[in-house]
Image: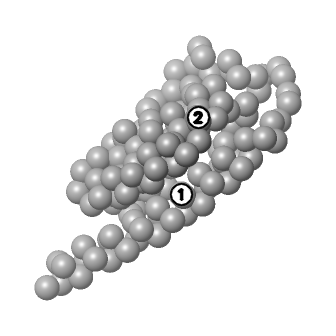
Amino acid sequence: MSQQINLQEIIRQQQEQLAAIQVQIQALLAAQGGARTGGGATGSNMGSHVEVAKPAIFNGETGKVGGFVTACRLYLRMKMREATVEEQVFWVLSHVQGETADIWKENVMEELEAVSYASPPVRKTTSPRWCYL
């Protein structure tokens, strides 16, 4: 019985994380119109020649979410600046596997697929806002 309660708590926590990420996705999509201009070392090709480690596979462990998010932010900022937001989200989801994380990932993918039918992909012109958090 306690294992079932523990699993329910994990699912609840991941649902909260999903809700927070969905808010971030909506904010990113809304911010696509406000492009930041700049040059020099902050240009979009900055990370093309720099080695950046990919994040380890995230299995949903609450204690590891911070490190996973940080690793994803770094990789996206350095290597995937020209990718669409949708491409970036699916790349992150490809690193979420196993245990209760699969349930969360399926929910996110279903929601993104529903949204993608409603609108074409948006090309990014700047790094997502959450890269600077």
Q: Report the front residue among 80 and 113.
A: 113
Residue found farthest to the bottom: 1
Picture coordinates of residue 36 (x, y %)? 83, 35
Residue located at (60% from left, 60% from top): 23
Q: Amino acid at mark 1?
A: Ile
Residue 56 seen: no
Image quarter of residue 6:
bottom left
* Camera sees residue 11: yes
Picture layout, residue 67 above or below residue 40: below
Residue at the far front: name it.
Answer: 118
Specify whether 32 is left or right of 106.
Answer: right
* Picture coordinates of residue 45, whole percent (x, y): 68, 18
- Residue 7 place in picture, x, y as percent: 24, 73
Q: Residue furthest left?
A: 1
Q: Residue at x 13, y 85 (%)?
A: 1
Q: State whether residue 65 is above or below residue 39.
A: below
Q: Amino acid at mark 2?
A: Pro
Query: Which of disc 1 and disc 2 is earlier in sequence?
Result: 1
Which numbered tag is attached to residue 121?
2
Left or right of 68 on screen, residue 75? right
**Callout 2 crowding tier (Cα within 10 Å): few <14, some 14–19, many ≥20:** some
Q: Mark number for residue 10?
A: none
Q: Residue at x 40, y 43 (%)?
A: 93
In this picture, residue 37 sits left or right of residue 113: right
Give the secondary structure at mark 1. helix
- Residue 78, percent from left and from top: 60, 28
Residue 11 placement: quadrant: bottom left
Q: Which residue is mark 1?
A: 21
What colour scheme has been applied to the protein in the rendered image? Answer: one colour
